[in-house]
Image (tube, rainbow, N blue to C red):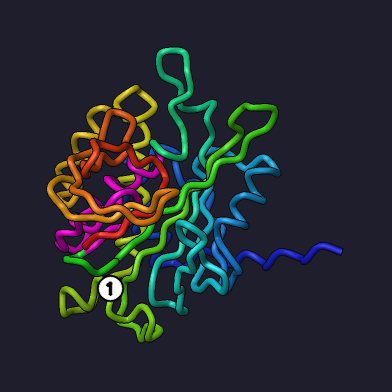
Amino acid sequence: MSEMPPRALPLPEEFAVVLNRRAARLDGFASRVAWYDTVTSTNDLADRAASAGAPHGTVVAAEAQEGGRGRMGRTWYSPPGAGLYVSVVLRPGLTVAQGRPVLSASSITLTAGVALAEALRSATGLPAEIKWPNDLVVGRRKLCGVLAEAAAAAGDLQHVVLGFGVNVHLATYPTEIAERVTSIEAELGRPVDRAEVFAEALACLAERLRQLSAGGFGGILDRWRALSPTSTGARVEVLTPRGWRAGITTGVDADGALLVTREGGAERVVAGEVRWL
């Protein structure tokens, strides 16, 4: 017998108000928001909603996650009320350019990174940067993570669930990650309106996704490069079948793969494990 999903709650009024102020920029995106108290994972609920026919732009958000996850199966620490834990349903049929879908997990991840970095800068003034492929950082401390998960049937892309977690308020983090993570409030030293960050993130995401659907990935990638100084000239280690190999980042290519130059030549890193040194 399958587990019953949690019951959705009304969107908190302060979130509804700031979202409504951005209605023109959203242009129908995020017109459906399912808000929860505590869930296992917003991505899981969004995927379930997508499989049941939820339209493009449907949002699932929660006050806390018990099983939030990031890239490579890592856990995303999601304490109650301290951050934003959000997933969005995206449909390939609504994003086609030059006769082919442009909505893919890779392009969505990079597009979302740009949108979220711009949203944090706009809503709070914090100069967040992107670390390839899916983290927003201040210095070397992680502030936000992005996870895009695609669902396909018979070889055709059905939908993409884009999840993102943003550390907003001050929180006590587990010892094993405490030195590697931060929050907006910790960096700014002042209170931050979580609802404003939520609404601005969705508005920026809607705008950048429309650019992507119009075939504008090249412009998005240019902006991504500008927001990701460590994608060029940074010392890294890449996990290969022969173990960890050191190299220097030399940018990203037209598909968003990280380029790493090391002894023996250059290498494209599409989805592998990278450590910044």
Q: Is residue 86 above or below residue 257?
A: below
**Picture quadrant where residue 126 is located:** bottom left
Q: How packed is label 1: few (under 14 Cα within 10 Å), some, or many (20 or more)?
A: many
Amino acid type of the residue tagged 1 in the rendering: Ser
Task: Tell me what residue is drawn at x 45 percent, y 79 percent.
Answer: 79
Task: Tell me what residue is drawn at x 53 percent, y 46 percent.
Answer: 149
Q: Is residue 236 above or below residue 175?
A: above
Viewer-closest of 208 and 41: 41
- Residue under pointer 1: 183
Viewer-closest of 152 and 170: 152
Which stretch did the figure color magenta? Answer: 108-137
Q: Is residue 114 magenta?
A: yes
Task: Tell me what residue is drawn at x 36 percent, y 86 percent.
Answer: 172
Image coordinates of residue 22 in percent, x first then y, are: 32, 48
Viewer-closest of 125 and 138: 138
Image quarter in which the N terminus is found: bottom right
**Picture quadrant where residue 42 is located:** bottom right
